[in-house]
Amino acid sequence: MRVLIASSIDENAVARIRASHDVKLCINADADTLKAEMADRDVLIFRSGVQITSDVMACAPELKLIIRAGCGLDNVDVPFARGRGVELHTIPQPASFAVSEMALALMLGVARRILEADESRRAGRWIKNQLNGRLLYGKTLGIVGMGNIGTRMGQLGLAMGMKVIGCVEHPSPERAAAYREKGLELVDFDRVVSEADFLSCHVPKKPSTRNLISAEVIRRMKQDSILVNIARGGVVDEKALYAELTTGKKLLGAALDVHEEEGEGKLSPFREMKNVILTPHIGSMTVDTYKDMGQRILNIFNDFVERHESKVAQDAAA
């Protein structure tokens, strides 16, 4: 198989694929480079940060398999891929642990004013009495998008002694009952927004979630609440959030792991705010997740190769 790896993945997985197959590494390349490198490839493996458009895939007439190492498909033209008969796989499970733990860390960071405390201590200041924080215990965690990651986040919230409520795009009595068995309460979006002390976003990026957390939604949030976006940049209207944090008195703070503008040299409008934590889309960036993801990539790839070779042999015999 001729394989193009367009994002950084576990080195062991790369080595094991390379041992028996033709592998090109083209990490985080621009569209023109991807088009050129894709021309003769059978398999594409990538993560976030790379746009796999119809134009890119059209340059790869032999493309048979796409492995998206992660849970989002907002950077793939899915209808085009399926229309071409390309086999498409995502790997959502490993990221659920890493991303949910990161969201919890961000909540704690804002609530306990960790950045302010660290900065002041490094400067030789001792402002202990000025750094009163907020507990998570006894508070309400609101989850926008209670899928794999959101459900795991809810379980972490329960472990912290929080009440957990959440919403999904397609609620049903059956889903509500399944969540109740886990101690999670399925409610509507409006209730999540208005009752949450900590509002955590875990929805995919698509037209219906673009600026989902709008100025109007922020106005309906609970007084002194904290907003966390670890889903995708663009789910939160950053202009509205900036306006609230600079001129309003509703939110206590925010944490953003994903941003409307991402990449080297992009300056966040929130960079001077002490009550905002900014991280560079590292929700799933753990050594453990990389290893798990790498093994799952190998499993999917090897299964595909075995099926493909079996079909070729059958066709030859016929």
Image (tube, rainbow, N blue to C red):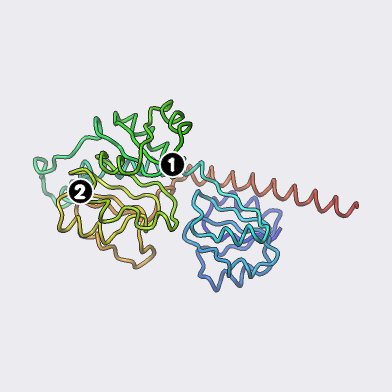
Q: Is residue 286 toward the left or the right of residue 34 in the image? A: left
- Given the current orientation, which residue lies at the most extreme right position? 318
**In the depicted view, which residue is nearer to us: 21 or 234?**
234
Question: Which quadrant of the rendered structure holds the N terminus?
Answer: bottom right
Label 1, residues with CA under 10 Å away: few <14, some 14-19, many ≥20: many
Q: Is residue 42 toward the left or the right of residue 283 in the image? A: right
Return the residue at label 2.
Answer: 251
Q: In this view, does 214 lie above or below 187?
A: below
- The span from disc 1 to disc 2 (Cα, nearest Å) is 24 Å
Mark 1: secondary structure? helix
Which of the 4 quarters of the picture holds residue 262?
A: bottom left
The structure residue drawn at horizontal position 23% and vertical position 47%, both measured from the top left corner, is 220
Image coordinates for residue 154, horizontal then vertical, percent:
37, 35
Label 2, residues with CA under 10 Å away: few <14, some 14-19, many ≥20: many
Mark 2: secondary structure? strand
Q: Which amino acid does label 1 sit on?
A: Ile
Q: Is residue 156 above or below residue 145?
A: above
Q: How many labels does the image show?
A: 2
- Given the current orientation, which residue lies at the most extreme top position? 181
Which of the 4 quarters of the picture holds residue 216?
A: bottom left
Return the residue at label 1.
Answer: 149
Q: Which amino acid does label 2 sit on?
A: Leu
- Given the current orientation, which residue lies at the most extreme front position? 173
Whether residues under marks 1 and 2 lie with C-beta atoms below 8 angstroms apart, the answer is: no
The structure residue drawn at horizontal position 20% and vertical position 48%, both measured from the top left corner, is 251
Image coordinates for residue 271, horizontal then vertical, percent:
24, 60
